[in-house]
């Protein structure tokens, strides 16, 4: 009985594989026969390695792996711990996390540096603990792929954070009383024009108009005890649907229907007379996304089967009022959508300007659109042209 159940779990896992790296490699007609032979050999190597790998897992771990793979990561599953060290795949060695990622999610992944552990799913959550225990988690749905920059990083992403902190201290220490008064007046003006919720446009010179008064988020979050790090509003075109959702935990799932997550369920938000584009888009939200507050910033993980589109202060290529950028997050990928180090550097730039050149900008707002992009590259000029989107308003000090 034990052997038959274990064998059944292994067969289910092998049937659930997504393929091998050979399946994603294009071949020319002249080399078709050789490529087919190579693909067949690679398939044999994968099967042999997979069987060897799965034999080292106990039955409980196999069950967890089956649940994770067959549910597509929707069901909560425990870590699948495996001893550290590379495993043999034919003539080469691979990290066990890379091998599981290739086998069940992304055949083209090659290096562990392309992957990010989902801290909110994975326990223990620290790399240091993994080093001490001598094991790594190989649950493929406790991992995501990292979004790569579309172009070389802008200057501020290479600017040392320590130098920025030193410059900030220098500005404070070297400020004359008169400069301090002018700076205080400047900060007051900036506080006056910075709204708590904004509409994001597509052009570098567009002014961002407030959708709600600056006190709305505070009034709605004050109904719950404890310290929150962000508020989330759900919009359909230009209409906000439901109340703002206040986030207290380090992460929150935003999804359409239960039991696809634990957090902000958009399916519970009712509205009469939804348009056809909104209805179509809502059917594709599915598991949605997870927002995670981490040491280096706010991360978004795309749990759905469709792309997400994001804009924030730190995703823009340079000064937010001059270069507007919308970034695409593919299914299964993660992106740091609000980088704390970059935001501190940009705050220093803002202190040098008494008034932004192109009008008010909410530096703590993040816009996320489901399925549909907006901006210069798309037919929708503004995010309010998107059927379903989120607005995330960070608290003044969201760091953990």
Image (cartoon, grey):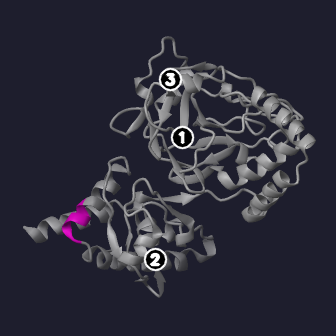
Q: Nearer the viewer, mark 2 or mark 1?
A: 1
Q: Which residue is mark 3?
A: 279
The answer to which of marks 2 and 3 sits earlier in the sequence is: 2
Q: CA distance from mark 2 to mark 1?
A: 35 Å
- Find out whether residue 283 is within the magenta segment: no
Residue furthest toward the top? 272
Dot 2: element = loop
Which residue has dot 2 on it? 95
Q: Is residue 63 left or right of residue 286?
A: left
In the rendered view, tell whether residue 86 sits above or below residue 112.
Answer: below
Q: Helix, strand, or loop for circle 3? A: helix
> Which of the two residues, 30 or 3, is positioned nearer the viewer here?
3
Q: Position of residue 47 (x, y in %)?
A: 35, 75
Residue 263 position in % (x across, y down): 41, 37
For image coordinates 51% across by 71% down, the residue present is: 22
> Looking at the image, do the residues carrying marks 2 and 3 touch, with CB atoms under 8 Å apart?
no
Classify residue 258 as left or right of residue 323.
left
Which residues make up the magenta segment? 58-63
Q: Which residue is mark 1?
A: 229
Q: Visible in this render: residue 345?
A: yes
Whether residue 26 sits left or right of residue 381 in the image: it is left
Mark toward the viewer: 1 or 3: 1
Residue 82: image quadrant is bottom left
Tell me the chief SS of the magenta region: helix
Name the residue located 43 percent from the left edge and 77 percent from the top edge: 131
Q: Earlier in the sequence, mark 2 or mark 1?
A: 2
């Amino acid at each position: 009985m034990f052997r038959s159940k274990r064998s059944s779990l292994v067969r289910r896992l092998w049937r659930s594989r997504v393929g091998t790296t050979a399946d994603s490699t294009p071949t020319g007609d002249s080399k078709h026969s050789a490529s087919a032979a190579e693909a067949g050999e690679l398939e044999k190597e994968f099967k042999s390695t997979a069987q060897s790998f799965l034999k080292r897992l106990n039955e409980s771990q196999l069950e967890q792996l089956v649940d994770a793979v067959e549910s597509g990561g929707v069901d909560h599953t425990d870590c699948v711990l495996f001893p550290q060290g590379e495993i043999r795949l034919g003539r080469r060695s691979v990290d066990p996390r890379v091998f599981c990622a290739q086998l069940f999610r992304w055949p083209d992944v090659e290096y562990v540096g392309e992957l990010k552990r989902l801290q909110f799913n994975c326990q223990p959550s620290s790399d240091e603990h993994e080093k001490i225990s001598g094991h790594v988690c190989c649950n493929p749905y406790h991992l995501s792929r990292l979004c790569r920059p579309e172009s070389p990083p802008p200057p501020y992403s290479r600017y040392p954070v320590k130098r920025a902190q030193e410059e900030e201290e220098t500005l404070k220490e070297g400020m004359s009383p008169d400069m301090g008064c002018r700076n205080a007046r400047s900060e007051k003006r900036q506080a006056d024009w910075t709204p708590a919720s904004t509409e994001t446009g597509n052009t570098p010179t567009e002014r961002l108009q407030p959708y709600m008064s600056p006190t709305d988020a505070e009034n709605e979050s004050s109904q719950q005890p404890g310290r929150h790090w962000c508020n989330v509003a759900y919009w359909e075109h230009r209409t906000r649907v439901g109340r703002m959702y206040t986030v207290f935990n380090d992460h929150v799932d935003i999804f359409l229907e239960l039991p696809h997550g634990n957090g902000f369920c958009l399916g519970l938000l009712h509205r009469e007379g939804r348009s056809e584009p909104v209805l179509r888009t809502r059917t594709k939200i599915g598991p949605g996304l997870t927002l995670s507050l981490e040491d280096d910033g706010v991360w978004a993980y795309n749990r759905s089967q469709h792309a997400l589109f994001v804009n924030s202060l730190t995703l823009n290529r340079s000064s937010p009022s001059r270069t507007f950028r919308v970034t695409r997050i593919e299914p299964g990928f993660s992106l740091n959508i609000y980088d704390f180090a970059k935001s501190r550097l940009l705050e220093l730039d803002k202190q040098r300007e008494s008034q932004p050149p192109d009008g008010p900008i909410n530096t703590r707002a993040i816009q996320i659109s489901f399925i549909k992009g907006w901006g210069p590259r798309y037919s929708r000029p503004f995010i309010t042209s998107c059927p379903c989107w989120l607005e995330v308003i960070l608290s003044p000090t969201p760091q953990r």
